[in-house]
Amino acid sequence: MEGISTRLALRCDGARADNRGTRMGIGEGSDGVLEAARVGAEWTWRALYRDTAPELLRYARASRVADPEDVVGDTFLRAVGGLASFEGSERAFRAWLFTLARHRIIDGHRKVVRRRTEPVPAKTLAEIAPQGDVEAEAMRALAEERVRVVLASLTPNQRDVLLLRILGGLTVEEVATVVRRKPGAVKALQARGLAAIRRNIERGAVTL
């Protein structure tokens, strides 16, 4: 149990390096993809969607919205409409996508009118998960559910920062841009959130 908080901390510290090691389209010196998207090359949006949609979907699922897949789709629609006004690298574009997703998630929560939401049923997770290795997908869904359970007791700000760091793979500076806070404030929220997780695990308040 105690090792869970340590793993979360390590994932926060290593999120940027891990994601750069597996991502092909964004953040690896291919800023021409955005330029091609601006002039209407359809393949660019397929590439951008492939590289970012899985992480956006995990973020939306963990944020407990009613329709995570709809959040991802709406995020890309907003990105297509707003690309002309966006300035920055592809790494910055990725952070911008999470900003759009976060705004969409906040709007969705406001419409719920304080109604308690339930965890996404396993059947729904299976339906919207990408097709592939069934065992790998099952383990990924289980890991996401464990993250949701562990983060459930945190404040909204702490939870938001850790979700963006752990599931989104954003750097502290990128999270600061998304949540409109200074990097120092993001680091403080992350530290307090991890400390709260450790305390909850130590006293048995969190069980997995």
Image (cartoon, rainbow, N blue to C red):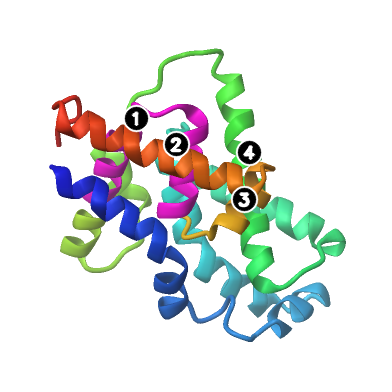
Q: Is residue 7 magenta?
A: no
Q: Amino acid at mark 1?
A: Ala
Image quarter (top left, top right, bottom left or bottom right) of the N terminus: top left
Badge 1: residue crowd in 10 Å (few <14, some 14–19, many ≥20): some
Taking the image as shown, residue 181 lies to the left or right of residue 69, namely: right
Q: Residue at x 62, y 63 (%)?
A: 94
Magenta stretch, residue numbers:
141-167
Where residue 14 appears, as percent x and y from the top left, is 39, 66
Badge 1 is on which residue?
152
Estimate the x, y position of residue 15 in percent, counting from the top left: 42, 64
Q: CA distance from mark 3 to mark 2?
A: 16 Å
Residue occupying the point 68% across, 51% down: 177
* Residue nearest the observer in this picture, 190 or 41: 190
Q: Earlier in the sequence, mark 1 or mark 2?
A: 1
Q: Nearer the viewer, mark 1 or mark 4?
A: 1
Mark 2 residue type: Arg
Magenta segment main secondary structure: helix
Classify mark 2: helix, strand or loop.
helix
What residue would you read off at disc 2? 159
- Residue 27 vs 11, above or below: the answer is below
Judge left or right: residue 57 versus residue 28: left
The Cα atoms of the two marked residues, 3 and 1, are separated by: 23 Å
Q: Could you tell me how far apart the alpha carbons at marks 1 and 2 are, in whole angstroms? A: 8 Å
Is the C-beta separation of discs 4 and 3 under 8 Å? no
Q: Earlier in the sequence, mark 4 or mark 3?
A: 4
**Which of 93 and 135 lies nearest the eye of the viewer?**
93
**Distance Cα–Cα, label 1 vs label 4:** 20 Å
Q: Secondary structure at mark 4?
A: helix
Q: Which residue is the site of mark 3?
A: 183
Residue at mark 4 to residue at mark 3: CA–CA distance = 23 Å
Q: Give the side of residue 92 with respect to residue 196, left or right.
A: right
